[in-house]
Amino acid sequence: MNRFSLLLFTLAVAGSLVGSGQSVPFPPDPDAVLPEFSDAAKASVLTCSPGNELYSAFGHTAFRITDLAADPPLDRVFNYGTFHFGQGFYPRFIKGELIYSLSTSTFGGFLEEYIRSGRGVREQQLALSPEDIARLNAHLMANAHPDHRDYRYLFLYDNCATRVITVLEDVFGPRSTVDCEDRIDSTYRDLLRAKLGGIPLTRFGIDLVLGLPVDEPLGKCGDAFLPDHLAEELEGMVLDQSSMQERPLVQAQRELLPSMLRTAPDEAGWPVTAAWAALALCILEWLLGRRAIRRVLLWLTGSVGLLLAFLWLATDHLDTRYNLNLLWAMPLQLLGPGLAKNSPVWKRRLGRALGWLAAGTAVLSAAPESVSIQAFHPAVLPLGLAVALCFEPWRKPQS
């Protein structure tokens, strides 16, 4: 994957992370006559392990419905992770309004993709009767209709994994009981960092564009946006809890394909090294009495600030709001205030204020996360200090 694709995917994930609102799956006609399924019919949830590419870093989830006694035999996969390029893609891309679809395929075709990529597939068979499977199949087929298959994809709140719980609740209503664990000791940012540890640039980009909302505790079922976490939550789900027929939702599980991929190490990676190198260059330049590198740095950080301000103020994104990274990467830095010796006093005072803000943010980023209200990427410490050095805030402007 080239660098342009890498950048696009980082921004696409960031955009999908920060959408607002939820789509409600289309319910089938309650009076419709449902096709009959045999006693051999099965319904299951497929959980696919993460891959080494960016688009597969979080894994995947899908429904599988089989009835090998049917004529012809049925073995169908319902996939909420289908994405289409189309008219208006880039405006939606920028605004974070990514449109995904529910598609269907044969199980053999679905599995072949994971065989080729070396990714694992785990199957959890659901404890459903043939009548229950007929209802679930009818609901999914109704959702897969061209008039209803599209939905607004919100990575944290409405994706291929969260749709599993939504569909089960829609189909079985009060018969299904979700007993997720409250994960008040974790945040969305914690889980994203764990998944992106082997992709340093994307981890840096995600940490940069997301603000305070993703540092809130997850709460109940908050981790179910990740396929492997959803699989764990399904094991605690039950059907018909208030009746004599109470039973666990997951009847059996098996590994269809083992993962052949090595787990990437969890590390911040080269963006941190590059940030410390930038600080070292700024210190060297400051000692030599020059400003060229610092001007370039302020142009870069000011441009980043423009992006962060745009995501906060000019879009419908929720999770990019209240982003404290704007304290060290501000659009005003594009003006290079106070860098020239003959700058007006007001401009030098502005530069001094920006310098102290950047220095303070750098110190805040090094504080324990229990103290700081936003978790910063490790690269923010050297970058904040480098920006502060650009303005030399300890020098009082002379009138």
Image (cartoon, rainbow, N blue to C red):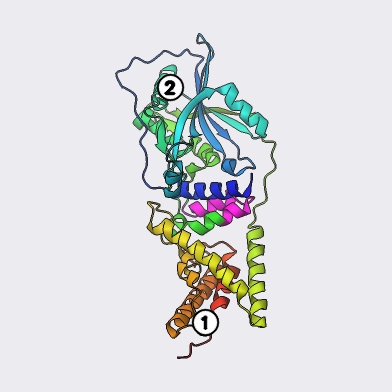
Q: Is residue 297 left or right of residue 132?
A: right
Q: Secondary structure beneath disc 2?
A: helix
Amino acid type of the residue tagged 1 in the rendering: Pro
Amino acid type of the residue tagged 2 in the rendering: Asn
- From what the image shows, is residue 394 above or below residue 230? below
Q: Earlier in the sequence, mark 1 or mark 2?
A: 2
- From what the image shows, is residue 52 above or below residue 292? above
Residues 175 and 377: in front is: 377
The residue carrying mark 2 is: 137
- Within 10 Å of disc 2 (Cα), the crowding (few <14, some 14-19, many 20+) is many
Verify CB contact (< 8 Å) between mark 1 and mark 2: no
Q: Position of residue 69 (x, y in %)?
A: 52, 10
Asked if residue 257 shows in the view, the reply is no
**Nearer the viewer's eye, disc 1 or disc 2?**
1
* Residue furthest front in the image: 342
The residue carrying mark 1 is: 393
- From what the image shows, is residue 2 above or below residue 288? above
Q: Which residues are the magenta region?
A: 184-204
Residue at 63% x, 58% y: name it: 268
Residues 143 and 133: in front is: 143
Residues 324 and 228: in front is: 324
Rounded to the nearest angstrom, the CA distance separating label 1 from label 2 is 65 Å
Q: Secondary structure beneath disc 1?
A: loop
* Residue furthest top in the image: 71
Residue 195 on the magenta segment? yes
- Within 10 Å of disc 1 (Cα), the crowding (few <14, some 14-19, many 20+) is many
Residue 299 on the magenta segment? no
Residue at 46% x, 60% y: name it: 308
Asked if residue 252 shows in the view, the reply is yes
Task: Tell me the quadrant of the picture where the C terminus can be found.
Answer: bottom left
